Amino acid sequence: MKRKNVISRVTPVTATPEALIAMAHHKEAGNRMTNMKEILCHNAVCFTALEDGSYDVGRELVKKIGRRALMIFSYALSSRNECVICGHYFKKIINDMGYEWETFEFTEEETDLLLFAQALAEDPNHVPDDVYEALQARYDEETMVILVTHAVFTLANNYFNNIVGTEIDDYLLPYVDGDVNKNFK
C-alpha cells in the first residue's frame, strides 16, 4: 500500500538559506533535484548527508565494480525493498546505459550482488554465509566496506521514500508501465 505524502516538498521560495546552498551545490554537480531531495531540503544537513554521501560512495564503488554492476545491485536492493521511486530510477539508468531491459543477462558477479541485495532486503541481520563468502572471494576488504556502505545508503533512501510517501517523479513514469522485476522479487 502506498503511503500518502506526509511531508511537503521544499521549493526555492520556501527553502532556508542553507537548503538553497545545498540545492545549488547539488545542481552544480550535475544532479537532478527530485521529489525526495526536495523533501530532504527541510534540513540541509540531512539532505547533504543522504544525497551527497550516497553519490560519493557510489562513485567509489564504480571504481571497484563498474557502473553496470553498481546499478544492478542498487536496483535489486530498491526493488526487493519495494521502493517504487528508487527501483524505477535505477531501472531508467540501466536502460539509459543501452541495455535492453527484458533481454540482458546477468554476469556471475552481478548474480552474486543480486543474492546479496536480496539477503539484505529480507533480513540484514542474517545474510547467509555463502552469500558473503562469494563476495569475499571476489572483492578485497575495502571493496566490501564500500559495497556495504552503498547498500546502507540505498536502503536509507528506500526507507525515506517509503516512510514519507514521496511521489514518483514525472521523468520516471515511463518506466512504471510494464515493469519487469528481473527476478528480484
Image (tube, grey):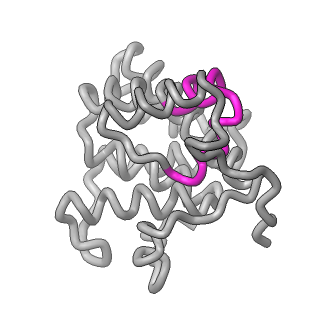
> For residue 20, what is the image quadrant?
top right
Q: In this view, does 46 lie above or below 34?
A: above
Residue 107 forms part of the magenta stretch? no
Q: Residue furthest front?
A: 13
Q: Which image quarter holds the N terminus? A: bottom right
Q: Which residue lies furthest to the top in this view?
A: 142
Q: In this view, does 19 lie above or below 161?
A: above
- Percent position of residue 172, x then y: 44, 68
Residue 47 forms part of the magenta stretch? yes
Q: Residue furthest bottom?
A: 178
Pick the residue in front: 171 or 24.
Answer: 24
- The reply to whether residue 119 is in sight is no
Pick the residue in front: 71 or 168.
Answer: 168
- Percent position of residue 110, x then y: 34, 49
- Percent position of residue 57, x then y: 42, 25
Which residue is pictured at 27% across the width and 34% down the height?
Answer: 65
- The answer to whether residue 84 is left or right of residue 75 is right
- Percent position of residue 151, x then y: 53, 36
- Per the rendered image, the range of residues in magenta is 34-51
Pick the residue in front: 62 or 16.
Answer: 16
Which residue is pictured at 45% across the width and 29% down the height?
Answer: 147
Pick the residue in front: 4 or 75.
Answer: 4
> For residue 26, what is the image quadrant?
top left
Which residue is pictured at 61% across the width and 39% down the height?
Answer: 128
Q: In this view, does 62 lie above or below 88?
A: above
Which secondary structure class fits the magenta region best?
Answer: helix
Q: Is residue 49 above or below residue 81?
A: above
Q: Which image quarter holds the C terminus? A: bottom right
